[in-house]
Image (cartoon, rainbow, N blue to C red):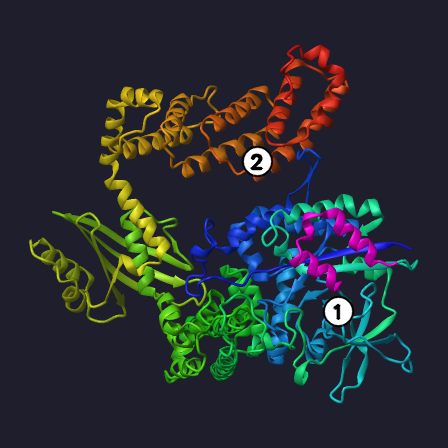
Amino acid sequence: MKNYLTIHGHFYQPPRENPWTEIIEAQPSAHPAHDWNHRINSECYYPNGNSRIMDATGHIVDIVNNYRNISFNFGPTLLSWMEVHAPATYKLILNADRESMARHNGHGAAIAQCYNHTILPLANERDQQTQIKWGVADFQYRFGRNPESIWLAETAINQVTLNILTEFDFKYIILSPYQAERIRTLNQENAAWKGVQDGNIDIRRPYRCFATDGDGQKIKDRFIDIFFYHGPLSRAISFEHILGNAGKFSDKIEAAFGTKQETKIVSVATDGETYGHHEQFGDLGLAYLLTIAAPVRDIIPTNYAAYLEISPPKFEVEIKKGPGGEGTAWSCAHGVGRWYRNCGCSTGGEAGWNQEWRQPLRDALNDLNEQLGQICEREAENIFHDFWAARENYIGVILDRSAEKVDEFLGQHLKDASIHEIRCKAMCLMEIQRNAQLMFTSCGWFFTELSGLETVQILKYAARAIELAAEFTDGRLEESFIGNLSKAKSNISSYEDGAWIYTNFVLPAKISFGHIVNHYAISAMFDALQDDKKVFSYDIEDHFQESIKLANKEILFGKIRVTSQVTLNSGEYAFVLINQENGEHLDCIVHKENGNDWNFEAAKNEILEILKEDAPVDINEMTRKVWRGDSYLLADMPAEERQKIVDKILAMQLQETYSIYKKIYEDNYGLMRMIARSGLKLPDELILPTKITFSRIIFDEINSFNLEEPKTNFQNSINAARLAEKLDLPLELEDATHVFQKAFEKIIDHLNTDFSLELVKKLEELVQVSDKLFLKLHKTPIQNAIFILLKQKVLPEIEKIIAGESDQERYDSIAGILRVAFYYNFNIKIYKDRLKNFENRFNQDPDYWP
């Protein structure tokens, strides 16, 4: 008769990638992070994989992976981002599931999620099938097993969706207690039903729910089990800040079990972002609850599947139908109205705002989706064996766009995969459908305003689908869509309606092949290419480049082949990039070579003749008559990429300025020291040169640090930092801090394989240097690395001393690491206690230990 606790975290972010580049652009609202994925990863996803258990004095005694002790789902599109941009977090999540399986008889903590968080009851049945199948395939690809459950976006469900779920091998789903209609004893058809419409269902046990046929009759061999989470406890986590008091929270959980002596489960379900992002340090409260507070009350943390194995359902449940049979959800009190009508549910916004825009937006996208489906069916008829079966399997390509995977997919689904044009068309049709799925991401309707970030994002997916379908239509598809969007009115008068928002916020995000060529040319001229064979999601083959300088002009000619990794479409392009006045004017003219009578060499020579003349350059004339293409500017690059180019240009042009600043600093060094000693303010004329010079001195010394060198010298940096502090000069040390952090972590990593006193001393020296330079290092990854070092290296080394393999160097190395650990807020008592009997032999210094 045991009490089990399951905490489910729904970890999810909407897809944010620009559908033309497949990258997430900078989101200023997420400052200081690059975008919201990065910010929430640093505040929530990564900390929950390395959550601290603290003692009464606030020192770290343990670091635990919360994910292994809970039930969780991660959105597939979020995990795709994380696999590339947050691999450390990604690894923690996968490891947690494996550890959970080992602890719970093969039942892992992770469950699947419908692919891009579409509200399933509002989707047609074919799209529901695809959302589920893509979610399952994504889970199998990452976790290497079949999911035992799937998270439904917003827990939205109706009987149609439930029927579809029973066609899969899911054991259970998780719903709100307010989504249950009535219950009765299982397998007793004559048992009376009990109404639980008010959320008064007993959540301490699982229930079985059956599929129904067209007449609403139960299908006895098709069912799925349901866990209903504890509503008040879940609300307390999300909105009442109870994570800050783990003792009080544990008391509430204990009370929820009641007094009846039977095996029971209490479960809560919340957005996973509650644990660290919405609720600062929420991960610490969760870690304490699961590893200390719950176990001392004989409450056993587990996951749903593990509990289901020991306690199968004894009761049957029917779910609510919702208004008109549309279904129900956990975050809407009006069925699933939040995602298609002005139901009254909203988050944020201003007084007087409404959500009347939701219905016309839903209608516009439904109409577009239907038209796209018809277009794809028509165009696919002669090239695919079964287009819709191909769409279901396309998730394999989404997960792995390698040439081998694409060839395998096309070979399996095309009638003839040998013709390049057919291959491109097939991929284009698949991408139409992928974007058609993404445009139904639920966040587009969740908030209060039509022009919000999330709604604009789903409209970008719609625009991309329309663009890809353009060659198969009469050109009126987008016109019709914009007309439908005009019925959706913005709450902000200046934004008018959906048509205005689409025209002004969505269409400017489009990227053409010409934009890619422009990006490549400008980046090549200023040596800013991160990869000379790739720009965003486009492969580049460089056939020819020639740089020529004429007076105050630099000209770059080139010929490249651009191929989309997504659609396989490609083209041959010739460009000329004209740089006038050291970057003041940058003009790129792009010509698409299509076998016409245009000649590259002749055009190149004609351009050079024009540019030799000391007269204003008419770019439009050259574009139209000579290069016969389209012209682009630096402003046509994405904002982030523009900034990189500007930074490159400034770096080149400011070298002489830096030398001047340094000389001003050196000439006035004695004067500045006198001013500092006198407590006076530095003259404005010296502030900027001194700040920049100090910052460069520190960066250059840190950047030249070499782990292999026996001695390091940061004295110039330390002197600069001290003087800057006395002069009250804030320095720009972000880049220096980043480099220093990497060096620091690298030494700790080396110590796992080379536990030498020399390396330990170097690590201690860096601790002192970071203090003297006032560097604000990111302590979390450093603490995580130290914790691994303590467990995997220091403890074994201590055991060697205890076993008799003792020497002074080993003892000093251990002591050095423990001093660093203490500096980084670790409780080191257990390690010191293990060494207590050896202190007289090795330690004669009263200040040896912190």
- Would you say residue 509 sits in the magenta stretch? no
The residues colored magenta run: 229-258
Q: Nearer the viewer, residue 710 or 230?
A: 230
Q: Nearer the viewer, residue 263 or 116?
A: 263
Q: Nearer the viewer, residue 478 or 409?
A: 478
Q: Is residue 688 above or below residue 122?
A: above
Pointer 1: residues within 10 angstroms few (<14), some, or many (20+)? Answer: many
Three-letter code for the amino acid on which mark 2 is drawn: Ile
Q: Is residue 768 above or below residue 778?
A: above
Mark 2 or 1, nearer chain start: 1
Q: Secondary structure at mark 2?
A: helix
Residue 760 percent across, percent down from the top left: 57, 23
Q: Which is the main secondary structure of the residues drawn in magenta?
A: helix
Q: State how many labels appear.
A: 2
Name the quarter where the N terminus is drawn. bottom right
- Name the disc covering residue 782, or none: 2
Three-letter code for the amino acid on which mark 1 is drawn: Pro
- Would you say residue 249 sits in the magenta stretch? yes
Q: Secondary structure at mark 1?
A: helix
Name the quarter where the C terminus is drawn. top right
Q: At 49% across and 60% down in the image, what residue appears?
A: 403
On screen, residue 391 versus residue 701, left or right, reads right
Q: Which residue is mark 1?
A: 177
On screen, residue 730 versus residue 832, left or right, reads left
- Name the disc covering residue 161, or none: none
Outermost residue toward the bottom in this view? 215
Pointer 2: residues within 10 angstroms few (<14), some, or many (20+)? Answer: some
Q: Dividing the picture into quarters, in which one does residue 310 lie?
A: bottom right
Residue 172 percent across, percent down from the top left: 76, 67
